[in-house]
Image (cartoon, helix red, strand yellow):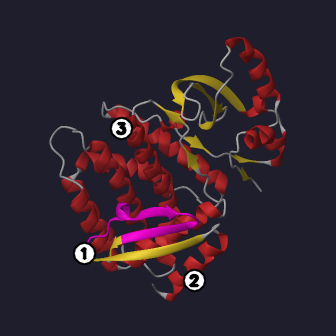
Amino acid sequence: MTPKLTTLLEQVNQTYPGTVMVRTGEEESGRLRMDRSQQSFLADRLLIEIPDKTEADFVIGTELLQLLLSLNGIVPQIFFGLTFEDEALDQQLVTIASRLHKMVMHGISYREMAKQGFLTAETATAFQAGIEDELTPEEKDIDGQHLFRLLSLVDAQIFNKVLAENKLAEAAKQADAQYKTLYPKANAAAKSLSELIVTADLKDSRTIRKTIVRVFAGLDELLEKADLPTVNAKQYVTLAPVLSERQLNGPVKNLFEIFHSEMTDFASKEKAYVGLGKQDQQNTFVIAPPKNPADRPKFFTELYALSVRELLEKLALPYILRS
């Protein structure tokens, strides 16, 4: 690793409650694949593995920056407390939502990597090669790969935007022309979704959270237009709140509405209730009521009367304090 990355790793380890390590494989394919990095845990150690040496510094730096953004409480975390009791479906939804969350972080980390000098013409070439290796060309009709292409191309459009901002506009233009030729429908949809990220001022937690919520909703709108099943991440995914002191000290009823869900609470295996933000209708917490229906009216009356701080502490859910 370069000295800059070594310094970044040291910063992460100053905050991480354990040790973060990085390992790079021996393969050098010429293709940059952001989706191939892996994280594994062993006791208090976190290992970030990059299997391909191609532009490894860019991938390592991006992973470390994103970890730092989460550790420092800048980017709200996501959690998965609900289940459809279908392991394959749950895993698919977790994967999609996690990619959407990471894309918003890429709106920050790609720009920072460019600022640090890790974004070059070689990085651009390898990134495009990775996209074309990952995706099959579109057929005439929308097929089962449309969502997969769309997600990858949103990331490509964020990357292209950062290229254009850093005197690599020609590389961005060439890549976009190729994406438009190979994946016209998915690329057009990806451009509209990526605009929500690249035009946002992702400098504070509140704006970052709003952007995540908009991306969740924006993906469903695109899938509806394509007559494909929606992800419904706004209800399925619990997104940590960003709150002021006043909001934290106010009652739950001021900020949230609690709805009965058709999904199951992953922990209790009972039908779940979901706390949705009144302003954005985003899942902020999941709660299991008493099993005895006769006890529920009192339970919910007391719940709504709790301060938001008391509820979040009771559920052991993290939140970000808005300055």
> How far apart in space, not on screen, are marks 3 and 1 (Cα)?
32 Å
**In the rendered view, would you say 48 is above or below 273?**
below
Query: Which label number is shown at residue 319?
Result: none
**Between 287 and 251, the one nearer to me in the picture:** 287
Q: Position of residue 87 (x, y in %)?
A: 39, 36
Q: Say which element carries label 1.
A: loop
Single out the residue that lies furthest toward the bottom. 3
The part of the image, by quadrant, that contains residue 71 is bottom right
Label 2: which residue? Answer: 7
Look at 53% across and 36% down and name the residue there.
234
The three-letter code of the residue at mark 2 reads Thr
Placement of the C terminus among the 4 image quadrants = bottom right
**Which residues are drawn in magenta?**
30-50
Label 3: which residue? Answer: 88
10 Å crowding of disc 1: few (<14), some (14-19), many (20+): some
> How far apart in space, not on screen, are marks 2 and 1 (Cα)?
26 Å
Depth check, mark 2 against mark 3: the one in front is: 3
Query: Nearer the N terminus, badge 2 or badge 1?
Result: 2
The part of the image, by quadrant, that contains residue 88 is top left
Decide if residue 60 is in sight here: yes
**In the rendered view, would you say 166 is above or below 261?**
below
The three-letter code of the residue at mark 3 reads Ala
Decide if residue 119 is in sight here: no
**Between 318 and 296, the one nearer to me in the picture:** 296
Look at 57% across and 83% down and name the residue there.
7
Label 1: which residue? Answer: 30
The three-letter code of the residue at mark 1 reads Gly
